[in-house]
Amino acid sequence: MVDFGIVTVGGDITKTVAIVNKSKKPVTFTLAPSNEESFKKCCLSLTPDKEVTLKPREQKQIEIRYAPKSRMPNFDLEVLLNIKDNESRQLIQV
């Protein structure tokens, strides 16, 4: 879970999460919000926003940015890890 805490309107906060490939094979994936419209409405963005390949035992830093432009109610959204040629799995809850 990633908690941004209290962020003022016009503020900008970025949280970093590490993803580690513990397998013996490379893994290619993309990150995607479970509900893209809600994600944008909540002023959230993900980096990297393109396909990534992790070699065995390699790790990648994922950034989740929250920059509210107006007062936001509490929200609970999921980030999915879409593994190439495989099923999607929940990665992070924001």
Image (cartoon, rainbow, N blue to C red):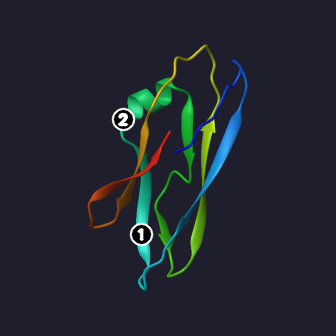
Picture quarter containing residue 30?
Answer: bottom left
For marks 1 and 2, the one nearer the N-term is 1
At x 65%, y 31%, the residue is 5
70 lies left or right of 25: right
Report the number of numbered marks: 2
Q: Is residue 15 above or below residue 25?
A: above
Q: Residues within 10 Å of mark 1 (few under 14, many from 20)?
A: some
Q: Residues within 10 Å of mark 2 (few under 14, many from 20)?
A: few
40 lies left or right of 71: left
Residue 28 at what x, y percent from top left? Answer: 42, 69
At x 51%, y 51%, the residue is 49
11 lies left or right of 75: right
Cα–Cα gap, marks 1 and 2: 21 Å
At x 72%, y 21%, the residue is 10
Element assignment for label 1: strand
Residue 75 at what x, y percent from top left? Answer: 48, 26
Taking depth in this image into account, of 51 and 11 the one nearest to the observer is: 11
Residue 94 at what x, y percent from top left? Answer: 50, 39
- Tag 1: residue type? Thr
Taking depth in this image into account, of 51 and 72 the one nearest to the observer is: 72
Picture quarter containing residue 34?
Answer: top left
Q: Which residue is mark 1?
A: 28
Residue 48 at what x, y percent from top left? Answer: 56, 54
Residue 35 got which mark?
A: 2
- Tag 2: residue type? Asn
